[in-house]
Image (spheres, rainbow, N blue to C red):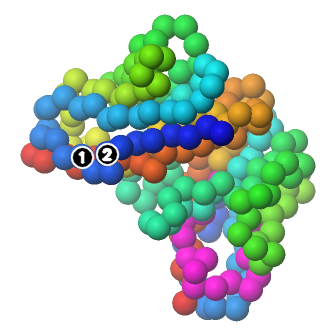
Amino acid sequence: AQSVTQPDIHITVSEGASLELRCNYSYGATPYLFWYVQSPGQGLQLLLKYFSGDTLVQGIKGFEAEFKRSQSSFNLRKPSVHWSDAAEYFCAVVRTGTASKLTFGTGTRLQVTL
Amino acid sequence: DAGVIQSPRHEVTEMGQEVTLRCKPISGHDYLFWYRQTMMRGLELLIYFNNNVPIDDSGMPEDRFSAKMPNASFSTLKIQPSEPRDSAVYFCASSLRGRYEQYFGPGTRLTVT
């Protein structure tokens, strides 16, 4: 069975600092991986996705993520965080055997201090 | 594109009442998903449809919950009778066959008193 682990429940960074949110997955084959962001009171918005090819993928809002098969990781990064990035971030993987059924991590809440 | 549309955005009802949540997926998408989000349980998949047919309803918590998709542009999630523990944010999402990424609506915040 597939699973996704986001080890950090809550992270606080200063505005302008760099950010890395961790995501580890458990899956036998090459996974399809996603990062979503949820601002307070909003739905989930797709930040970026990895299917195959280049292991460094670029997303919206200046985010990027790197797929590392050896570490079973798909960490999200941003070089300089803005106060508007404060939100909850979810990593997700496509579940085996069903074309579009996503398994979500428990989320990481990002707080940005000024 | 208007994105996934959900209504109502907020619903407050009394225990025992029937609640109907509505969703319009993105035009052309053939998968539709219903999720529930709570602080305690996080994001849970309740049911999903492919081409208007329910494929997996194993996440539906109990018989009080039912979902329908009468056509490609409309789905409902019904709770009858509602209970306080059903209080949550309910999301609808849609995706295109072979594309895997899901697009979420803004959610319906349900409060059952």
The extreme left residue here reads A114
Q: Secondary structure at mark 2?
A: loop
Of A57 and A11, nearer the camera is A11
Q: Quadrant of the N terminus of chain B?
A: top right
Of A43 and A35, nearer the camera is A35
Image coords of residue A103 (percent x, y): 60, 43
**CB atoms at circles 1 and 2 under 8 Å apart?**
yes
Please rate how many residues cluster around mark 2, counting C-alpha atoms within 10 Å: few if below 14, some from 14 to 19, many from 20: some
Q: Chain of mark 1?
A: A
> What amino acid is found at the position of numbered circle 2 in the picture?
Asp
Q: Is residue A89 left or right of residue B20?
A: left
Q: Residue at x 76, y 50 (%)?
A: B48
Q: Which quadrant of the view contains residue B43?
A: bottom right
Q: Which residue is mark 2?
A: A8
Q: Is residue B49 left or right of residue A87?
A: right
Above or below, B66 relative to A14: below
Q: Point out the frontmost of discs 1 and 2.
A: 2
Q: Which mark is residue A11?
A: 1
Q: Which mark is residue A92?
A: none
The residues colored magenta run B77-92
The extreme top residue here reads A54
Q: Which quadrant of the view contains residue B102?
A: top right
Residue A46 seen from this side:
no
Image coords of residue B9 (percent x, y): 56, 66
Image coords of residue A105 (percent x, y): 49, 45
Of A75 and B75, nearer the camera is A75
